[in-house]
Amino acid sequence: MYGVCGCCGALRPRYKRLVDNIFPEDPEDGLVKTNMEKLTFYALSAPEKLDRIGAYLSERLIRDVSRHRYGYVCIAMEALDQLLMACHCQSINLFVESFLKMVAKLLESEKPNLQILGTNSFVKFANIEEDTPSYHRSYDFFVSRFSEMCHSSHDDLDIRTKIRMSGIKGLQGVVRKTVNDELQANIWDPQHMDKIVPSLLFNLQQVEEAESRSPSPLQATEKEKESPTELAERCLRELLGRAAYGNIKNAIKPVLIHLDNHSLWEPKIFATCCFRIIMYSIQPQHSHLVIQQLLGHLDANSKSAATVRAGIVEVLSEAAVIAASGSVGPTVLEVFNTLLRQLRLSIDYALTGSYDCTAGVSTKIIKEHEERMFQEAVIKTIGSFASTLPTYQQSEVMVFIMNKVPLPSSQQSIEAGKAGENRNRLTQIMLLKSLLQVSVGFQCSNMLTALPSAFLDRLLSAALMEDPEIRLFVLEILISFIDRHGNRQKFSTISTIGDISVLKLKVDKCSRQDTVFMKKHGQQLYRHIYLICKEESNVQAHYEALYSMLMLISIELANEEVVVDLIRLVLAVQEIAQINEDNLTAYNRCALFALGAAYLNLISQLTTVPTFCQHIHEVIQMRQKEAPYLLPEDVFVERPRLSKSLDRLGPEVFFWQSKISEVLGGSGYNSDRLSTPYVPQLTDEDRLSKRKSIGETISLQVEVESRNSPEREQRAPAEEITYETLKKAIDSVAVEEQERERRRQVVEKFQKAPFEEIAAHCGARATLLQSKLNQIFEITIRPPPSPSGTITAAYGQPQNHSIPVYEMKFPDLCVY
């Protein structure tokens, strides 16, 4: 009976008759709108029938697809779309299952038109906000199929473009449908991200092909709006913009794998473009997670080719610039530690020629110039990172980098042998280059904060290294710290300029913090400038850096006392060239004379003391006539004009300390200090320095005592170096070590001993001190005994003698 009713149209269920009525006899006539309205009204009136309507429409669509009746297929999908848009009842979930089943059937078809039709319907469905959640719906098939469509390789270019765009739109629909619904399948799982992200990146890569075709401007306006590249970029931005904190890793990892698999790090253009999109799309507070992912990927590729590592590092640099200030995250020093570790690994690769430092044979050929390119990229990235940090973190980073520099006078490990020396030297140079990159962008008004004592000590100890390149880096770093008003470029060339006003210097009054800094560290700076001037390996760049440093100290950090000390220092440098105890070359001696002339010429104009300016001007004029090779215009040129008769120069071509102290003393400067020759305060650092032996240091200390006269006309002979003097010097070092150890033990005792023990120890010492003080006061206050024990007054009556307190004479121990 049931089968008979199924064949009779009048006895069929009403929902089936309503569904059948929407299909016209000729599919080209399209959907019958009046009947569609009746079907929609019926579905709204009887929502419990909606799932049956969907199942029947699905059955008809599958039959039409198999019979290639594609006109009716389109009508069925149009009807489904209208029902979806109209119905939001609780029974829609079962209807959606039928709908998704039909969409899947269309996507499985080999016909591009059906695939596009199914995708369009799915996109419309994705934009609908459902009233009731679904606990069992799965989109795995759609992610896989849409990703496959994104990689379409159809022979027809237009059809291929349409299929790829449909695939991208489908992925966009899946993301919109699932990303904010916790009950749906988690789209952020690696199994989904590994399909979605590479599909979008694959279409982003096609931008180069599209540019190479260069369409006409009229065509471009229409086609660019519909290009897969722009659609993929829009979809990727939307995906990343919806990513929460815990999903960033799963979204970024497929990007890194895709770039690895397709060797896209080496040109770096596409990789940079990708991460620019990523950094601008994600939420700003998540930027540091992307940077950490890149750093981890750099570590994972530490044995890859230098070009690959350089590409990753340059992408890191771009990402750091885009990231907001301070977004490197809580592990700032870990970021720089990773970059510095890669720098040291690159140095090892370049020296050993192998990616495995323990093995003697490498399967890969390492090109030294590529490793240098990678090292420069790392240094640039360190500067980019530092520029995004606040001032206090930049200071911490600089201290961190400086502590990594291997120095002979520090606890840093120094490798022996020729290979070890090369490695140490390259490491020192690369780390100082990195420090210079950070210091260039560092702006701090307080020099005490910018240059802490421990940091400055290590930095200046590098200035005593034998390598001239290292010394030059140290000078450049110091200059970048001191130059806070951009005056550095105005002193790039050394000259005896006649009018300082043409330089348009920016000069501010020396602050209290700068005065404290110079009182604390001034002598240390002067001593290192003095010692650097004595180096025979100095070239023009060193003298230009020294000149800039002297002038910047005079402008940025100088008060009257500092100016006096700098003039004394320059006169001592002139004496180095004049006496030539270190057997300097003619060029070095002429350069020191020229350096002194250029500095005194400018400082005399800054002090605005007429008599001082006159004396300096007279000496410079005399040099122009008698000895032009003592002026910077003849020395610091491509072919310097030198003289070998520097020992027979007349007194008129020198700057005399007595004359300068006389003219400046009359203007309120400290003439006593000006007339005292500058003598550097030598410390243990010189004894521990790599370039000086203990004997040389003692010789310097002995000879320094003989420099007493202002003009050094009479010189006492240097003390002879004997075995006894060497033994005393070594013993003094041992005594200092014992004193240091004693202090360490005292500090350790107060840090670790129980409170009762410390209190008892201090109480015993306090009691002993009080008893000693009581004895001293008794001796001091008690009057001296007379023969009778009393003093007789003028009136003959005995009385006790009382001495006023202000007339008492206390021992030195009691006087503060």
Image (cartoon, rainbow, N blue to C red):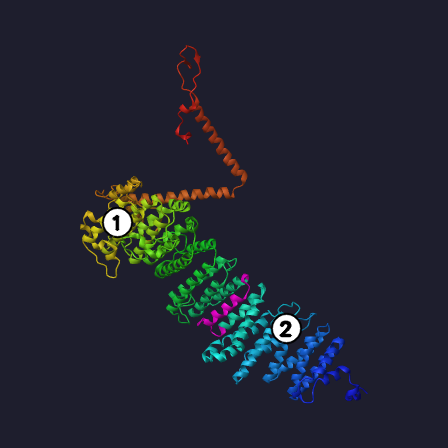
Q: Amino acid at mark 1?
A: Gln
Q: Which residues are magenta?
A: 260-285
Name the residue furthest right.
Answer: 1
Relative horizontal placement of residue 682, taking residue 25 as reference (left or right): left
Secondary structure mostly taken by the magenta-highlighted segment of the chain: helix
Please say whether residue 418 is visible from this viewpoint. yes
Residue underneath mark 1: 574
Relative horizontal placement of residue 47, taking residue 514 as reference (left or right): right
**Magenta stretch contains residue 279:** yes
Quadrant of the image containing the C terminus: top left
Q: How many numbered markers are drawn?
A: 2
Residue 306 falls in image quadrant: bottom left
Quadrant of the image containing the N terminus: bottom right
Q: Secondary structure at mark 1?
A: helix
Residue underneath mark 2: 127
Q: Nearer the viewer, residue 180 or 477?
A: 180
Report x, y in % for residue 659.
24, 43
Report x, y in % for residue 164.
55, 79
Chain-order first, disc 1 or disc 2: 2
Does residue 473 sit above or below 251 in this rendering?
A: above
Q: CA distance from mark 1 to mark 2?
A: 83 Å
Does residue 586 sit above or below 118 in this rendering?
A: above
